[in-house]
Image: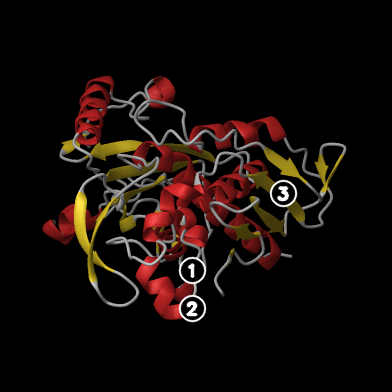
Amino acid sequence: MAGNSFGTIFKLTTFGESHGTAIGGIIDGCPAGIMLDLEKVQEELDKRRPGQSAIVTQRKETDTVEFLSGIFEGRSTGTPIGFIIKNSNQKSGDYSHIQDSYRPSHADYTYDEKYGVRDYRGGGRSSARETACRVVGGAIAKQVIPEIGFSTFTSSVGDIYIDDEKDLDLSLIESNPVRCPDPVSAEKMEALIREIRSQGDTIGGTVQCVIKNVPKGLGEPVFNKLHAELGKAMLSINAVKGFEFGSGFKGTQMKGSEHNDLFNPDGSTVTNLSGGIQGGISNGMDIYFKVAFKPVATIMQKQQTINSKGEEVEMQGKGRHDPCVVPRAVPIVEAMAALVLADFFLQNKTSKI
């Protein structure tokens, strides 16, 4: 299987399966001499871990990260940083009913077609449990670029949206289990998720990320544009179906005279419909984007599907699953954004030597 690594200079490689002994990763390219706050890494993991509230999967995992290499006396040594997160609460028996059957909209069928073998326990490598490793990598990446600030939050669940024009207090992101900085919308979102769960169903939503204090000049023109790499990073996350930055699709409804970001004398812009990126390169303004997540594919309702013999069978989801992945996806989106920004920061630094 290829495609287990992300990044050019600051690179993360992950390994492991949902119901294996452990998941883990190797962070390569982290500069030497950086004082690393490992408690902050664990804090990021705690935001993603299962069982943290009544509206997420009740799988009980501490998600405690163990670092194996690359750190000495609290500082990065410049060598690969290896880490593992042990699995401790697998219930593989919950998946025996899909050993020979394919769950609709999961990776079961495509994995079988491509590899001829799959780990059906929790989806194996295709499980979103792998994203815990990304959160570790992103938490380290943030400490490589401490001057850059990230604010990531739930912007919609189902048909409940935060008003884009509303002045949000981003300090409220962690004040509710939905991770929405608008208390009124958060209450409605939580109620909707609870209602959907009671129906044995799932619901999707969007996550928004705002990145501040970004240096000018990050990104490589043509194929490695900054927004292209952010898009790749986000679309690599399980259940993501869409990515838009800056004005996004709303920009298609505007005229050029409305959409152009006019300059201030200092090089900043009056508006920021470009989303902080022009020509694939950061311009110093805030970068902002949204990521769309589909409803979780496993539902507690009966559905028709097929098995490995092509026979039609009936299936109903079992086990512990998120009715809405969005609240736990917030730290994953932020981690992937940090990986991209750290990688381009180091590329930019190298290009100027």
Residue nearest the viewer, comparing 110 with 12: 110
Q: Earlier in the sequence, mark 3 or mark 2?
A: 3
In the image, residue 254 lies at what x, y percent? 13, 56
Mark nearest the camera among 3 and 1 is 1
Residue nearest the viewer, comparing 273 with 137: 137
Q: CA–CA distance between discs 1 and 2?
A: 7 Å
The answer to whether residue 262 is visible is no
Tag on residue 115? Answer: 2
Judged left or right of residue 279, residue 13 is: right
| Depicted 249 relative to depicted 39: above or below | below
Q: How many marks can you see?
A: 3
Q: Are marks 1 and 2 in contact (CB under 8 Å)?
A: yes
State the residue at coordinates (47%, 49%): 93
Q: Secondary structure at mark 1?
A: loop
| Depicted 310 relative to depicted 210: above or below | below
Residue nearest the viewer, comparing 253 with 130: 130
Judged left or right of residue 328, residue 73 is: right
Mark nearest the camera among 3 and 2 is 2
Residue annotated with mark 3: 83
Looking at the picture, which amino acid does disc 3 mark?
Phe
Q: Secondary structure at mark 2?
A: helix
Looking at the picture, which amino acid does disc 2 mark?
Tyr
Looking at the picture, which amino acid does disc 1 mark?
Arg
Tag on residue 118? Answer: 1
Q: Work out which quarter of the rendered image holds the C terminus and state it.
A: bottom right
| Depicted 59 relative to depicted 339: above or below | above
Local crowd size for mark 1, using a 10 Å CA cut-off: few (<14), some (14–19), many (≥20): some
Q: CA–CA distance between discs 3 and 2?
A: 27 Å
Quarter of the image for residue 324 reads: top left
